[in-house]
Each structure stands twice: as structure tokens, then as C-alpha cells.
Image: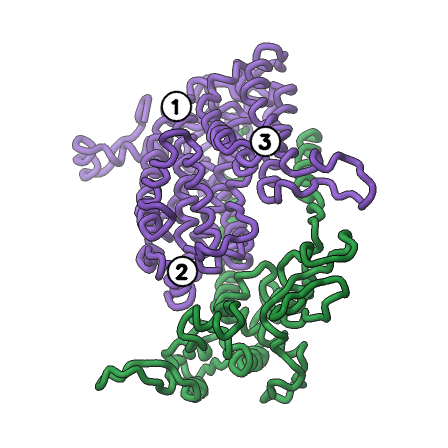
Amino acid sequence: MLRKGIALAALGLAFLGSPALAAHPKPVEREVAWSFDGPFGKFDTAQLQRGYKVYREVCSACHSMKYVSFRNLGEPGGPFYDPEYKNPNDNPYVKSLAKDIQVPDIDSDTGDAIQRPATPADRFPSPFPNEAAARASNGGALPPDLSVIAKAREGGPNYVYSVLTGYRNPPAGLTVAAGQHYNQSMNGDLTSAWTGDHHKVPPGGVIAMPPPLADGKVTFDDGKPSTVEEQAKDVSAFLYWAAEPKMVARKQFGLGAMIYLLIFTVLLYFSYRRIWRNVAH
Amino acid sequence: MSGHSTYEPKTGIERWLDTRLPIVRFTYDTVISFPTPKNLNYWWTFGGILALMLGIQLVTGIVLAMHYVPHVDHAFASVERIMRDVNYGWLIRYMHANGASMFFLAVYIHMIRNLYYGSYKAPREVLWILGCLIYLAMMATAFIGYVLPWGQMSFHGAVVITNLFGALPVIGTPITTWLWGGFAVDNPTLNRFFSLHYLLPFVIAGLVVLHIWALHVPGNNNPTGVNVKSESDTVPFHPYYTVKDGFGIGVFLLLYASFVFYNPNVLGHADNYIEANPLVTPAHIVPEWYFLPFYAILRAVPDKLGGVLLMFGAIATLFVLPWLDTSKVRSMRYRPTARLYFFIFVLAALVLGYCGGQLPDDPVIAQPSGLLLLDADINSFVWLSRVATLYFFAYFWIILPVLGLTEKPLPVPESISEPVLSHPATTPAGATASPEKRG
């Protein structure tokens, strides 16, 4: 038994062994205490509403969110959920938000390509008609779709937040090409652009997107001070909601499932003890 | 399935059916009255867990197939639709994705248990080989299934793995073209992968039937490794093992649920939430965790063909294992020397898995700059993989064959009932043991 224990401990140590020191430093990741952390975490509705405003007024100029519909905003867990309107398509607030946005359509009488106000059933319209147009308007870089961005990057919402707040003046010795910006949290390797001491390569990478946020750029309806920190935090939370809109339902279902399984397992354990009590084994 | 059947049809319809299709008798003999050694420990509950996982993967998979679109332009979007718009789609997909990992976790524990207790030895060689075939089919199914969401890791993983066959001389290129249905991983590849991903689980189910059949001829091995000598060594499968397996399944489901509900993406890779783009290659292509040991073996060899052959050789070795182990003693409980080598083997397999997830040239031991403790070339994951790979093969091809002839095993008990039992009965031996019939 002791020998078994030692062997298992050795296996555990093998797993916990310190990760290798990479040749270049890791990007700076700043962690935020999110309201949706942990098994009981929920979205902060006010934060999602502010985050939606940041996306709508800033990000949506270049970034699509093609898997998200306006109706999603009014679904349970979403920023504009109203229990009075079980069908989010009837939610007047969602309707009015959608109505302000023009979406492309085909006129059913003439067949002409037209623009019309969106309805809750519409997807968020994309800012560019195709990838070539998006690249042409952004100095050759393609702004990624943001529907699942908070799941598509290691670090999730912390990564999004860190990049949005990670713009710094490039340290002396770092060559940053025109149209690029140094960001201490961007995934990348700056070794080749660094002319200084090769043991002190700066963390992070370069990003084509100029710093998108600025103090006071968005006016929050709830009176929250509109700092870059706050905007970045709120839009990261909103993007995490967009990537994982069923998170609240998942955790609630999970609580019931865990309790059920726990009771079931305990009952099985005592049944097992009872059934086996007369058998030497 | 073998030996004397104790089934007695009790109703008219059972008697009628029994003389035409004895399916009730078959079920009774298989899962009710089947005599099972009474000393099986919790390592034996993984067979039942695996059967359940296969069932969960089949049911969730069939529902997912109702909503999934196997086309390069729609696959990624259809998965997002499942996550957002299909009722409980998030639950079904997360159960399926994490279910694959849980399935592999259980199968690895099941295999390790076999290695420790010598369950592959005569007369259970065919049972073991059928298990290896199930494992092989599982690996094919899991790899193909990972391609279907058509994310970046799906696509580039498919490119890497299918290209492995290209390393084979002469037949390599025709095989890859045939696998792809074209000259690159593209829509025909996705289509056939979807078709095969739906087919293979039923092949696995068929193999499982054969596996259980082959189990029921010699019966279960047990922790002592000695054969069942008399009826007093066994208990009927039901209720004794249905309840014990049930408890094991309950604990396993708690672990599974904690992933599905609270950490659904922790075992996956973030890049797979980026739609596949053949023009952008991810910086670091890694397979799912359950393939990492094989990935490490592949990369341990500098030559591509050599790496491919060694990787497939690692799986092929398992098939011939019953004839490599020369020891007459099944259980490592009575083989202290072999047991030591066995634990090093488990460690080597875990080290391989860890190395498979790292960049090959990264140093294993971080050292302060300017101070060179180990040669930079030797202090790398590729070298650690080489050492572990060497041990992996040496364990099967050198240690097990030699040890069986040279070691001095401990005395083996006469029967299952003879060794000091860890859990004596709580009522006197004279009392009849049929608690299932009492209140």
C-alpha cells in the first residue's frame, strides 16, 4: 500500500512538474474577477448592457458577430432579458435596438438589393460585405468575427480584456512596422523585431488594430464612469456572454444534475454495502 | 453464454419464446446469473462505465447528427446553431465532446488494470485482442469526430494525421488521396469523415458484443489472478456487481458532469472555436489529450516514416502482448519486481502524454541564464520523449519476456477464497447469503 502511494505521488508530481520556460516571455494576462466566475456565477445584466453599447458604438464598425441575433439580447441570461416577454422577439427594448440598425435585404417586389431596419429575428449585420473589403479597409488585416472570440483565445475574457488594455509605447529597441501597434498582451513573439538584450525580449506582440477605446468614448446609460478599464471590462463580459449565451442555464442545470447524481451515488453505495454484507470478499 | 443455464421460464409467454428465440435466457445468463469472482475491486467497474459511455456517445451523437451539416461552408455555423438555437443543444454537444474524453479516460484505466492483473493471459488472449480492436476503432472515431466541427484544430489536425500515411513508400500518396477524396483536406474529406463517424460507433458496438461473449467463456479474471475453483469463489452478477458497478458509474458520472456543466471547454483547444482556414496554420498543432502519448512517440523519431511506424508499432505491440509476457503468474500482486517496472511504465506513458503537449525543443528543466547545467540539446522535450519511448517499448519487448523467466514470484494462493479477505462477512458464515430477497 505504501509503495502504491509513493508511486501515485510520483505520478502526481510528474503532472505538476513546472512548465518549461519558453524562449520568449509570455504575454501579460491581467485577470478580472468576473461575475460569471465559479459554479454559481451569473452574468451581470447591467455590465452586459454597457458591453453591448461598447460593441455597438465602437467594435461593430469593423468586427462582425455573425452568429448572434438581436433576439439573443432578450433571451434569459442576456443583456435585455425581460421576464414579461418570454418570446424575445416581442421584447420592445430589443425591437427598438434592432430598428436603429440597417440590414441588407432583397426587395421582394423588385428584387433590388435594399437596406431595411432590422427586426429581433435578424443576425447582427456585418460591417463589410466580404473578407477582401474588410482587409482593404483595415490596412490588409482582417478584423476577426467576435461571436465566439471569448472562447477562441487561450484565457478567454481575460485575454480580450488584457489586449484591449494592453497597448503600451513600444520599448526602445523594438521595431514596430507602420500600421502595427505594440501590445503587451497580444499573442506573439517579438524576438525577431527586438534589437536589445536577447534575454529581455518584451512580452506580447504587435496588433494591426489601433487602440480602440478611449476615456469617455462611450456614454453609459447607467452613469458608470466611462474609463478605458470599464469599457474593456464590460465589452469582454458582453463578448463572453455572446460566446456562451447558455452559461447561466448550464450552471443551473448542472447544480440539479450534481445534487441528483450525488444522492443517487450515495444510495447506491449503501445498497452496495447492504447487498455485500454477507459475502466475504 | 457458456456452461449450465439456470434460467427457468416462469410465464407462458417466456416458455413459448424460450423454445423459439431464447433471448430472455440469454439475457438472464449474461447479466443476472453469470457467476463472477467475488473479489473484484473497483478497477473492475470500468467495463460497465465503458458500456455506459458508448451508449451516451451513441445517443448524443445521433441527436447531434440531426442538426449538424457536413459541409465546409456550414459545419462550423451548424455547430454554433446547435449551441445557440437547438433546445438543450449546448448540453448534448458538451456531453458528446466531454464524453469522448471520459470514454478514453475509462478505457485507459481499463487497459492499465489489464496490464497490472495480467488479464490478457491465457485463456483470455482473444478477449484482449478484441479490446485492442475496440481501442483502435475508438481512436479512429475520436480523431474523425474531432474534424467535424471544422475549427482550426480540426482542419490542421486532419491535415497532419492524414499526411502521416503519406510517409509510407509507394502506397503512401495513393492512400492519402483516397482518404481525402481529392488532393487536399476539403469538402469530400469532411463528408466521408461524417459518414465514417456515424458508422464506426456501431462497429465498436459489434466488437463490444464479441468482447462480452469472449469474456463470458473463460469468465472474469480477478485481483489474485488465480482461476475460479468452485462456486464458493463466485457470486451472481446481479445484484452483487450490478450494484457495485452502479456505484462506480455514479462516481464517474459526477466527474463527467463536473466537466460538462462547469468546465466544458477545458479539455478542448481554444483554436477550435476559430473556423477552419486552410491559409492560416495555428502556431502549435496539438491533438486531444488522449492522443498525446502517441504524438510524442511520433515526434521522438527524427525520420517521418520511422516516427509513423513507431507510433503504429506502439499500438501493434498491444495486440501481441499475450505472447510477450512469459510469466505464468497473472497478477502483479505476486510479482513484486514486475510491479516496480509496471509503475515505471505508467510513469513513462504519462511523461509521453506530457511531452506530446509541449514544444519539442523547449527545455524540460528551466535553468538560469548563463548557467548551463545540462546540454541544451539533451534538456528538451524531444529527448525526454525519446527516453520514455525507449522504456515504453522495452517494457513490452524486453522486460516482460525476460522477467517472466528470471523473477521469483511470491507464493500464489490456492484459490480466490483462500487469501486473507480484506472484507470479511459481517454475519456468521452459516447464514445464507441472499440479501436481495430480504427486506
Q: Secondary structure at mark 2?
A: helix
Determine if residue A262 is in view: no
Kindly identify which chain the residue marked by label 2 belongs to.
B
* Whole-number angstrom distance, CA of label 2 to CA of label 1: 41 Å
> In the drawing, what numbered circle is on residue B126?
1
Label 1 Cα neighbours within 10 Å, binned few <14 / some 14-19 / many ≥20 = some
Label 3 Cα neighbours within 10 Å, binned few <14 / some 14-19 / many ≥20 = few
* Whole-number angstrom distance, CA of label 3 to CA of label 2: 54 Å
| Residue A158 vertical placement versus B113 (above, below) | below
Residue placed at 55% from the left, 59% from the top?
B262
- Which residue has dot 2 on it? B76
- Which residue has dot 3 on it? B423
Kindly identify which chain the residue marked by label 3 belongs to.
B
Q: Which kind of residue does numbered mark 1 sit on?
A: Val
Q: Colour of chain A?
A: green
On screen, residue A130 versus residue B291, left or right, reads left
Asked whether the residues under the numbered discs 2 and 1 touch, taking CB atoms below 8 Å apart as contact, a structural biologist would say no
Do pointers 2 and 1 mark residues of a single chain? Answer: yes
Furthest-top residue in this view: B405
Kindly identify which chain the residue marked by label 1 belongs to.
B
Please tell me how many numbered marks the rendered image carries: 3
Q: Which kind of residue does numbered mark 2 sit on?
A: Phe
Q: Secondary structure at mark 3?
A: loop
Q: Colour of chain B?
A: purple
Furthest-right residue in this view: B371
